């Protein structure tokens, strides 16, 4: 049964909201739209194109947007989020991604807009969580998330460690990592050792730290390919 009203903990009637969905994978997009429709949420427009989504909001207002982080070539979901906020400062933003942390993409991405929510797709085990995320995204600024919906373990990694993890996943040698980081080979080796320790990998001669780091990268990126 589809509800006609649903007050969230933030006092937001989620079912009265108009939602924009931008997701470049057609199957994922149709799944999201179908799930929201089943829950009674109005999806005003859905598309796989950042440009089409931004063109739509020039003519029609929306209350919140569900945005995929990786929209292929061109603007990312975070870029779209900033564009939406310029025209609609109060619009709710939820960015969905296969990456546990946007830094793992290897792209120089801007920070999320204030109050935007970032969530890893695989953590959405129940579609009703979408209602909670949408409600949080449009709550008064003081009650909103500060840029993430859940604590990510990769938040404990520095930007350098995230970059080292990506380089290791690319299969780069210590010498090449040192070259790209403008440092010595020894410093690169030490950085990899510190990263392994931070990730909880013991210095075990029977295990290959690089393999373990690469596996962890794959887990945190949802199997997406590392980019050089």
Image (cartoon, rainbow, N blue to C red):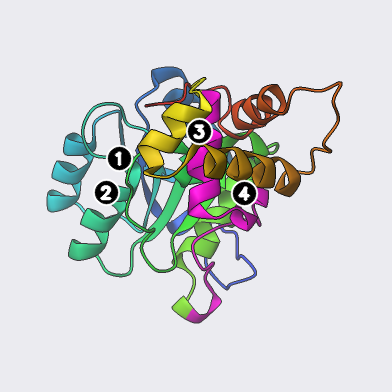
Toward the viewer: 111 or 96? 111
Magenta part of the chain: 142-169
Helix, strand or loop under label 4: helix
Contact check, label 2 and label 1, Cβ < 8 Å: yes
> Gap between marks 2 and 1, in whole Å?
5 Å
Instruction: Using the image, tell me which numbered label, if any, was put on residue 76.
Output: 1
Residue 163 is one of the magenta-drawn residues? yes
Mark 3 or mark 4: which comes first in sequence?
4
Predominant SS of the magenta segment: helix
With 22 as the anchor, is 152 left or right in this view? right
Instruction: Using the image, tell me which numbered label, if any, was put on residue 79.
Output: 2
Nearer the camera: disc 4 or disc 1: 4
Nearer the camera: disc 3 or disc 1: 3
Mark 4 or mark 1: which comes first in sequence?
1
User: What residue is drawn where x is 42% and y is 28%?
Assistant: 176
Nearer the camera: disc 4 or disc 2: 4
User: What residue is drawn where x is 54% and y is 45%?
Assistant: 187
Nearer the camera: disc 3 or disc 2: 3
Instruction: Using the image, tell me which numbered label, if any, was put on residue 166.
Output: 3
Helix, strand or loop under label 2: helix
Name the residue tied to disc 4.
Answer: 154
């Amino acid at each position: 049964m589809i509800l006609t009203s649903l007050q969230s903990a933030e006092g937001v009637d989620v079912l009265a909201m108009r939602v924009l969905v931008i997701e470049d994978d057609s199957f994922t997009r149709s799944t999201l739209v179908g799930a929201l429709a089943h829950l009674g949420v109005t999806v005003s427009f859905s598309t796989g194109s950042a440009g089409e989504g931004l063109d739509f909001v020039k003519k029609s207002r929306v209350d919140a947007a569900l945005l995929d982080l990786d929209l292929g070539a061109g603007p990312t979901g975070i870029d779209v989020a900033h564009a939406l906020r310029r025209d609609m400062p109060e619009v709710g933003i939820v960015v969905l991604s296969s990456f546990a942390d946007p830094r793992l993409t290897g792209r120089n991405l801007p920070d999320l807009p204030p109050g935007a929510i970032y969530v890893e797709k695989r953590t959405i085990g129940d579609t009703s969580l979408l209602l909670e995320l949408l409600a949080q995204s449009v709550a008064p600024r003081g009650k909103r998330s500060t840029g993430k919906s859940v604590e990510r373990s990769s938040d404990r990694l520095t930007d350098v460690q995230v970059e080292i993890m990506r380089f290791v996943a690319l299969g780069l040698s210590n010498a090449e990592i040192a070259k790209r980081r403008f440092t010595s080979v020894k410093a690169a080796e030490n950085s990899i050792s510190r990263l392994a320790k931070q990730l909880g990998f013991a210095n075990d001669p029977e295990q290959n730290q690089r393999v373990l780091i690469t596996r962890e990268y794959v887990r945190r990126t949802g199997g997406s390919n590392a980019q050089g």
